[in-house]
Amino acid sequence: MTEPPARLNGGSTPSERRYFLNIALGYWREEKARQAWLLTGAVAILVLLTLGVQLGINYWNRLFYDALDRRNGTALLHDVFFALGLVAAAAAIAVCLVHARMRLQIKWRGWLTRRLIGYWLADRRFYQMSVVENEGSNPEFRMTEDARLATEPIVDFAIGLATAVLTAVAFVGILWSVGGTIELPLGGDKISIPGYMVFAALAYSALASVSTLIISRTLVERVAEKNEGEAELRYELVRVRESAETIALLAGDADEEARLDVTISALLDQWVKVAIQQARLTWIINGNSVFAPIVPLLLGAPKYLSGSLSLGELMQLASAFVQVQVALNWLVENSIRLAEWNASARRVGALAGVLKSFDERIVGEHGTTIVLGDSPDESLHIRNLSVAQTNGSLVIEDPDLVIAPGEKVLIKGESGTGKSTLIRAMAGLWPWGSGSILRPTNATIEFMPQQPYMPLGTLRHVLEYPKPETLRSDEDIREAMQKCGLQHLSARLDEEDQWQKILSGGEQQRVAFARTLLKKPDIIIMDEATSALDQLSQARVMSFFENELKDATLLSVAHRPELEAYHTREIQLKRREGERSVHAVQRTYSPLRRVWRGLKKRLSRT
């Protein structure tokens, strides 16, 4: 039976925590396992040493108060030096434990974040998830902040739980041995209760824990809703920043402010719900912290007054009782952080589940996908291709094409006929549909969208993106810039800036052509790649396909009729009457037509 996919929105599924643990615990199984186990071993040793110091301090309570009760100054002085040694040991161990704990948290969080980013970027899932509704909900928040919140606390919890268990076992032994038996009058007889301090500690802890669990039963959901609200606000703020110019030109700031106000109000309501739950917990947590030290003194007072316990033993019991409470009430004290961790772990697990099953789900939902393979020759073969939307409805049906090496093919059609979707399928970005696309083996492909990507870094890095295997000389780069009309930027080649904002739309498209000139790919796929250029600039860059890039195979989507002169064939996408899907109609441009278009092109230059 197929395992249900993890959801990124709404409630959790049972598999979310399993997805999280499966990927997160790989730190102890995979390439960094040695590092993980060394850090874990160091933390474990330091936890044991911390327990040893706590036992020493508990024993010191007995020695100090017994010496105080006997008014023995010499013994008190010895106890003071003993305490100083315990303090020094405790401080040194605590420093080492903090260092080891934080290194484990940092290394684990870094490993998990890199692993999630690797899964997200692999096989272009980051693009495919971005076009699927409700998939990849705020993945950047999940891979960074949620990954931190899901790993850092779990180290603290592991240390806290181990310490709690060891402390409970050690100090329960002290309560049993030092507290001894108490005799209580019952009717005319007496009833003996051995280890009564242990039973009292367990009963008191159970009462506090059950009360806390009842009060905080909805805290996990409230925290999950709050985290989702935080991610949504960040997402909307990023969208406003990225679209700042368009929003400003449209005078849409008031509308954006109103939308953000709604999101903030919803987030604040979620925070209020979390605050209410935490306030309820405070009744138990604070009340317990005040009352717990008093309980053992009240329980031990009769034996002390009868002479069965010395003052030192009574104080040792009081200290041990508090330590047992801290250990047994560990869940109580950490319930809020456990809720935070659970919510974040579920969100990371949901993302991990989607990343893990995304490819399987594409096939499972529609039965088939577009197959990318190697061509039997140097041509680009498109066989029985049907391109679908992500919901399975057909967009383009059964085109069958062979595009020879060096051929220039123009894809045209009305808006909404799926031109961009078709070329994304050819570029390997769009798997939804059926049929096959066979590309020449080892062919290099360059995809040129309408809005070119301008990475962070120097202008040199922008022009060479992604980084080439061999560095290109300044002369080659400046020559490509000059051919594309970017010579005015040559002096800024090694200047680092936000080029996405500095360069105009036309300059960015010319940068894309300069990139292509430097790479000289075998296949070039363009989607309105000259839409921001004037006719002269467009003619300048398109002439590359008659000279520098004449051997490259070109597939381009464009509306401008003057671009026909640079292509040898046209694929017209048309919707037949009464049908929802689109069919491809081909025609080859006659030599006379191309000559006429070329003449018009030269006339337009003059």
Image (tube, rainbow, N blue to C red):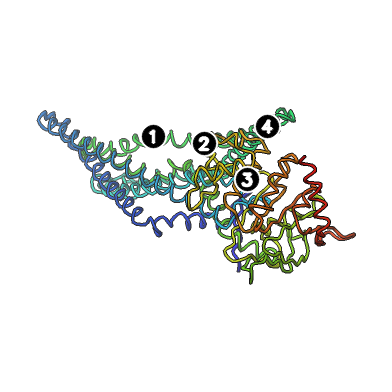
Q: Looking at numbered disc 2 in the image, what kind of residue is underneath it? A: Gln
Q: Nearer the viewer, residue 297 or 408?
A: 408
Residue at image location 34% in from the left, 53% down from the top: 35
Quick one: which residue is furthest to the left in this view? 74
Q: How many marks?
A: 4
Tell me the SS state at disc 4.
helix
Q: Which residue is mark 3?
A: 512
Tell me the SS state at disc 2.
helix
* Label 3 or label 4, whichever comes before in sequence order: 4
* Label 2 or label 1, whichever comes before in sequence order: 2
Neighbour class for label 1 at 10 Å: few (<14), some, many (≥20)? few
Q: Which residue is mark 2?
A: 278
Q: Nearer the viewer, residue 403 or 541?
A: 541
Tell me the SS state at disc 1.
helix
Q: Residue 245 — which label?
A: 4
Name the side, left or right, on which 509 lies relative to 94: right
The answer to whether residue 192 is visible is no
Q: Nearer the viewer, mark 4 or mark 2?
A: 4
* Label 1 or label 4, whichever comes before in sequence order: 4
* Label 4 or label 2, whichever comes before in sequence order: 4
The location of residue 165, given as percent across then percent down, is 34, 50
Separation of residues labelled 3 and 4 (CA atoms): 22 Å
Q: Nearer the viewer, mark 3 or mark 4?
A: 3
Q: Looking at numbered disc 4 in the image, what kind of residue is underneath it? A: Glu
Separation of residues labelled 4 and 2 (CA atoms): 42 Å
